[in-house]
Amino acid sequence: MEKICVAVRVRPPICHENSSSTFWRVDDNQISLHKLHGSPISCVSYAFDHVFDENCSNSDIYELLTKDIIHAAVDGFNGTSFAYGQTSSGKTFTMNGSSNDPGIIHRAVNDIFQKINIISDREFLIRVSYMEIYNEEINDLFAVENQKLQIHENLERGIFVAGLREEIVNNAEQVMKLLESGEVNRHFGETNMNARSSRSHTIFRVVIESKGKDTGSFGDYSSSDAIRVSVLNLVDLAGSERIAKTGTGGVRLKEGKYINKSLMVLGNVINKLSDSAKQRAHIPYRDSKLTRILQPALGGNAKTSIICTVAPEEIHIEETKGTLLFASRAKRVTNCAQVNEVLTDAALLKRQKLEIEELRRKLQGSHAEVLEQEILKLRNDMLQYELEREKLEMELEKERRSHKERDRYIRDQLMMIENLSSLVSDGDGSSSQGSMKESPIEECNNRGDDFKTPCFRAAPKAFVAKRSNYSQLPDLSPLPDSFSDVADEDTWFKINKGYIADLDSLQTTPARKVQSFPPEDVTPLS
Ligand SMILES: Nc1ncnc2c1ncn2[C@@H]1O[C@H](COP(=O)(O)OP(=O)(O)OP(=O)(O)O)[C@@H](O)[C@H]1O
């Protein structure tokens, strides 16, 4: 777990106000508000990881705040660095810089290529993309046709923007050219506060993949087969603005509302994350596209730094206090960054082999022989138990099968008895008329009726059932009064037979040929 690194940068004053009665003083990574004659104003003092005064350069900021994150990204850690602050406080200046003082992005790109060129035992693949969030819509700055892109999330890629163009790059110059082409597509606009105000949040993303060069050495599994994938976000946020000050209307006003809203959500996320873990409830990442995309950087698997830019003029005192409050809260947020390593099958195999080797080495200590014998004995015991278990299982299965057979036999016998007793009573009637009556089924068949609906008067307690595992027809097939009587076989059995049947093998009878009833060798009782 590590805290987000937070710094404050005070931009040089744009206009020197004669009437100001306060000023911001920077000493030793602290920033405090002072009265003009020098005495500090109580409760308006803040300390951060770094506080840069108006004389600092982008190079100072890069060295102290961002460089470590860039180097960690090359080593496989996710990283994010973003600039936050009110409009015209110097965010774009910090991220993009000027020709004589290049910004964080320029320096990071140079640094990445310098670093990977001196790492001789790994090979790298670098991809870059550039997007903006304008009026809560994601646009691709490398491909203007890719607009209103959607955010997706899956196990393999985490949170990502679908359809965003990614360019594979081999050197810093290539990236700079791409960035220049992307800048053209970015939304800027003039306001009272800034002649070239960013009207969107921009995210420049570098994906760094690396794999150890195959040295042929067996021992080092990670150098040849594990792939590291890290994502680096360099973010220039649009600035919060007070509409009364920016003097915007129409399109600018609409943009300002979207900007303020998404910054408010970012503030909410930071607030929730800065609460103690116990108080932390739901973190509203999904309330804006910005926080959703930056989710891993805010309390997740990434190393993150925030540069909060402030304007020194007295007229911006409330906005500066707001930014410092945001920065104080951000300072309490902790992330949990780890190297993102994807193991290939070959790497996994090598890792397992190494673990076995390691165990074997441990075994070769002073008690090796005793331990090996112990292991051998345990393994034999285990085999013995396994054999015993299999034998018992087979016996149990045999027992189960014979039990089922017995059940079935008893059931058949009971049916036979019942049907015979019904015959006896029917036989009584027919003998009194002097001739054998047609069986109910024959009666039915002779009328050409479909056997689905019982249309006869049969032995009162009889039923029709099919046993799916019968190999041949039963000697006597009992008949139903009606199918409704056999719909609930379970009930039927319980009521009529007093024991529970194997219900799986019982189904109501489909139309099928049923043996004539009674069979020829059964003589009706008189
Ligand atoms: N440290 C600095 N040194 C010199 N000039 C600066 C510095 N910071 C900002 N500026 C100048 O101040 C003006 C406003 O800066 P910038 O456009 O970077 O602000 P911003 O925070 O990005 O504003 P917005 O949110 O409106 O886009 C620019 O003209 C810029 O060149």
Image: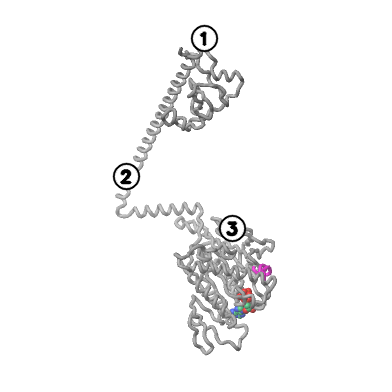
Residue type at mark 2: give it.
Answer: Lys
Label of residue 434 in the image: 1
Left or right: where 457 falls relative to 135: left
Q: Is mark 2 within 8 Å of ligand 1?
A: no
Q: Is residue 186 magenta?
A: yes
Image coordinates for residue 239, horizontal then vertical, percent: 61, 73
Over which residues does the magenta segment extend?
179-187
Quote the CA–CA distance across marks 3 and 1. Answer: 88 Å
Q: Is residue 394 left or right of residue 428?
A: left
Seen from the viewer's position, the closer of residues 182 and 131 is 131
**Point 49% across, 76% down: residue:** 48
Q: Is residue 22 magenta?
A: no
N-term-proximal mark, 1 vs 2: 2
Residue 351 got which mark?
none
Q: How many marks?
A: 3
Mark 2 falls on what kind of element?
Answer: helix
Q: Position of residue 188 (x, y in %)?
A: 67, 72
Image vertical order of residue 115 relative to residue 481, above or below? below
Examine the image and state in which quarter residue 174 appears: bottom right
- Cα gap from disc 2 to disc 3, whole angstroms: 54 Å
- Residue under label 2, please give it: 377
Amino acid, disc 1:
Gly
The crowding category of the residue bearing disc 3, from other C-alpha atoms within 10 Å (few below 14, some 14 to 19, many at least 20), is few
Whichever of callouts 3 and 1 sits on the residue coming sooner in the sequence is: 3
Label 3: which residue?
152
Badge 2: few (under 14), some or many (20 or more) residues near its Cα, within 10 Å?
few
